[in-house]
Structures are given as C-alpha cells and as structure tokens.
Amino acid sequence: MNTRHLNTVWVVLMLATLATLGIGEFGARFGLAGPLAMAALLAICFVKGRLVALDFMGLRGVKFFWRSLLLGWLLLVSALIAIAYWIALK
C-alpha cells in the first residue's frame, strides 16, 4: 500500500465526514431529513467503514474470507439500523 493511495482514501473519508455533517446540520433546516437522508447517511457510513477496513486496517490484500466477514458485518449492522428506522416510522 503506497502513501499516495492512503492519502487519497483519507481525503475521501474527510469529504464523506463533511457530507454527513452537512446532512445532519442542514437537513432539517432545508427539508432533507427523513428516509432519504437516513439512506444517504447509511450508505456514506458503509463506504467509510469499508475504506477503513480495507485500507487502514490492511485487509485489502488478505483472503476473501476475512474481507467478506468484515464487509458482511458492516452490511448486517447497516441493515439492522435501516430496519429499526423503518419500524420506527410506522
């Protein structure tokens, strides 16, 4: 893993953090709150988790089993959060 790649990933993570901050801070003021905002936040969080796991934890070059185990865990947690949000809307 070279430094340039990690710097690019870091910049993407910072931009994603700013996006979640923007959705959280300005979403309610401009009518962007609700299921669409929640879906966007979950997608951004999944991408951030994936980048951290694969690049900063060094799992990009390991066997498929370990990568799929961690990414499956991320998907499971994201799905459970989405289901809880959906149930709360009813």
Image (cartoon, grey):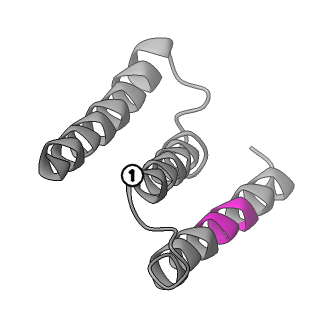
Q: Nearer the viewer, residue 19 or 49?
A: 19
Q: Taking 41 as reference, is 71 above or below it? A: above
Could you say which quadrant of the image residue 78 lies in? top left
Quarter of the image that includes the N terminus: top right
**What amino acid type is highlighted by mark number 1?**
Pro
Q: Residue at x 52, y 42 (%)?
A: 50
The residue identified by callout 1 is 35
Q: Nearer the viewer, residue 27 or 90?
A: 90
Q: Whole-percent x and y of residue 18?
A: 62, 76
Residue most extreme to the right: 4
Q: Which residues are magenta?
A: 11-16
Q: Residues within 10 Å of mark 1 (few under 14, many from 20)?
A: few
Q: Residue at x 58, y 47 (%)?
A: 51
Q: Taking 73 as reference, is 36 above or below it? A: below
**Image mark count:** 1
Q: Whole-percent x and y of residue 54?
A: 56, 39
Q: Residue at x 57, y 71 (%)?
A: 17
Q: Report the magenta stretch's main SS.
A: helix
Left or right of residue 3, residue 75 in this image = left
Left or right of residue 25, residue 1 in this image = right
Left or right of residue 36, residue 11 in this image = right
Q: Whole-percent x and y of residue 30?
A: 55, 80
Q: Residue at x 53, y 69 (%)?
A: 20
Q: Whole-percent x and y of residue 80?
A: 21, 38
- Magenta span includes 74: no
Q: Secondary structure at mark 1?
A: helix
Q: Nearer the viewer, residue 12 or 23?
A: 23
